[in-house]
Amino acid sequence: MYLAESRRGTETAAPAPGTRPGRRAAVPGTVLALGAVSLVTDVSSEMVSAVLPLYVVAGLGLSPLGFGLLDGINNGVGALVRLLGGHLADRGGRGGGHKTVAAVGYGLSALCKPLLLLAHSLPLIGAVLAVDRTGKGLRTAPRDAMIALATEPRHRGRAFGVHRAMDTTGALLGPLAAFAILRATVDGYDAVFAVSGCVAVFGVLVLVLFVPSRASGDAAAAPAPAARPALRDSLALLARPTLRRLTLCAALLGLTTVSDAFLYLLLQRELALPAHLFPLLPLGTAAVFLVLALPMGVLADRIGRRRLFLAGHAALLAGYALVLLPPSGGAVPTAVLVVLLHGTFYATTDGVLAAATAGAVPPEQLGAGQALVGTGQALARFACSLAFGAAWSAWGGRTALEAAAAGLAVSAVAVTLLLRSADRAGADTGTDAGADADPSTEPRSPDPVA
Amino acid sequence: MTRTARLLTLLLAVLLLGAVGTGAVLYAADRSGERDREQAGGPEVRSGSVSLSPPDRRLVLRNLAWGPHRDELATVPADRPDGPRTASGVKCLRFHAAAGTGICLQAEHGALDDTYRAVVLDAQLHEVRRFPAAGIPTRSRVSPSGHLVAWTVFVSGDSYAGTDFSTRTTIVDTRGWAVQDNLETFTIIKDGKPYRAADVNVWGVTFADDGRFYVTVATGGRTYLAQGDLAARTLTTLHPNVECPSLSPDGTRIAYKKRVDGASPDAPWRLYVLDLRTMTENATAEQRNIDDQALWSDDATLVYSLPGDYGADLWTTPADGSGTPQPLTRSALAPAYLG
């Protein structure tokens, strides 16, 4: 078990772990504990995700058409709930607001697993899924805020890398567990939901017991906020040039990030990949993400998070190019290459963006900051899905992907210019402790200019 | 709370949750015992020999009744659909048969994921040929001659890909094993003009003969009834808002599910019948949501499944909109008439 409190800094407002002189920087216990919570929770939620289509179609004899529609709507709701979660967490302040909101979020999702045992019609299943998404939306921003608060700024890339690797491990183990249960039982969907519920409760317990409610690392450095941030203050975060630029960059690139489902379908079609290999594509992406999350996080700390975030999108662009202009040599090697690039894209962008965001907002508004950037990106990707679907209808998938690739290239150039102008203005040192964040609340990064 | 207390709490929770989880799995594993016992009032099922070319008219279905033959193909006399079922030992998720040819869509439980296959069966239910299927099976049909088989599966990624779906419909000619792997590659003629769009999804084949069939074509957020020509590789749209068509034995009408206005978005489909000569459509007396490809038991009667206590039950209703829906038999899915 990862013990957040196994370090002694917790009780004594000592500097964040890893900052003690003469000791090699480690990943704070809080991050490991949160990683364990995410791992366990992802095992639980991916168990359900893996069998839900099968359960709905083969078990209940319902239609996946309505189910897909419902899920899309729920995802949109989840993105908006995230804003609320971030704000509420900040309002709770250092006294444990983040942990409380995260616990409610994890708890809500845990509650949904046994409810699936009782829901047998599509509207009911949809309602349970909506609550599940609400829980996910609530917990995401406070969780990322806690990771950032517990970690010394110059090691945040690494910390988020560790967290995302643990999270993805859970996502890979979940389906394995679910199918093991299905094989061991007779139509054991109820057993899958029950075990998933137990695992989820275990995750909540790990959070409650082992994640400290007070972020010790910066408690000493930052003065207590004068007042609880109001909702207006959360939106006023966008007035901060660094965060505004980051949100803009994430949204701009998100607008041209084709959803995984579309990409896999196009990959399968353009390369004429054997249909039975299709389920391996997302697995491959997740595996690459898992392996590269930590090294890419460390790299982000070295060369600059925004730079790596941009490089990640270059990897994605290369993936698009490979789908559009597959080299001779067979469909499978090309698909492997695309999956490699796609996983690299996630490893270089997902946790890295959270780490970059952490440097762009004052600590007492970390929840809202994470939520703003995350929601901006999620909504942009949602818009991209709608537009991509429309373009696919009008001109065909190939043309749609060509348009997306062109858009991504243009966005990447625009983002490069945006970030460069920020550097030139001297407001941003290229790493993430931007100077337009209040220097009194955010320690300057000692890293060299990226 | 001290560290020791926290660890003890966690240990206790692990034991407790572990016990609950293990109990749930054991209960589900043990359920084979319960499910091996027939339910009181359920259909009687006996194992026996099943032929797809029986001497009398019979109904073949996927038996969902609990007991040792759950999920197996079973037959009942067509005139006594509630009578004793003869179970074949062959399990299928979806099935259809005509003229001694069967198409059985099965799941194959793998290490990482379930995979699916479409198996062509002869009249004695022996496997003739199998094809890998790219996703969860949904529709299957055999042409009246028994020469052509068709099936539709849902292709979707896992949670990383959301539950966006795409269908894949395949037609196989059992005479030379020519495979049309993806009907989306056919030329679509919409409103009299060739139509190109890559968001096209095609599902739910119903055969007229060994050259012509009808199918659902979805594009741009709408669904259409399309007539397919296997030799010309074309799909010509005929009528909007048609899903899962089913051609009457006399070839004059199509039963289908229609998305009606004002219904719940989760349950929008009602059973309609379209007259192909006049292109007029009529609602049947069935007012519940129908998510099935209906089956014609004769030129006047439709059979379809509705959710039931043991998965699904079969119901019938007159095709002309008269009468009221009647239960046909309980705990059954994927019916087809033989002989």
Image: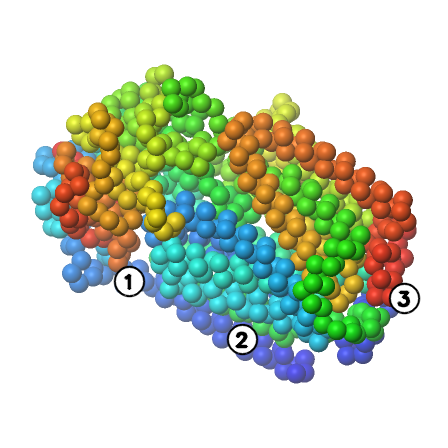
Residue with the mark numbered 3: A22
Q: Is residue B86 visible?
A: no
Task: Determine whether A296 is above or below A229 in the image.
Answer: above
Residue with the mark numbered 2: B13
| Disc 1 element | helix
Earlier along the polypeptide chain: callout 2 or callout 1? 2
- Mark 1 and mark 3: Cα distance apart in space: 64 Å
Are the numbered discs 2 and 3 placed on the same chain, yes or no? no
Identify the amino acid type marked 2: Ala
Answer with the quarter of the image where residue A94 lies. Answer: bottom right
* Image spot of residue A166 (x, y percent): 65, 57
Q: What chain letter is assigned to the residue under label 2?
A: B
Task: Determine whether B181 is above or below B45 in the image.
Answer: above
- Mark 2 and mark 3: Cα distance apart in space: 39 Å
Residue located 41% across and 44% down the image: A65
- The dot on residue A244 is none
Identify the amino acid type marked 3: Gly
- Mark 2 and mark 1: Cα distance apart in space: 30 Å
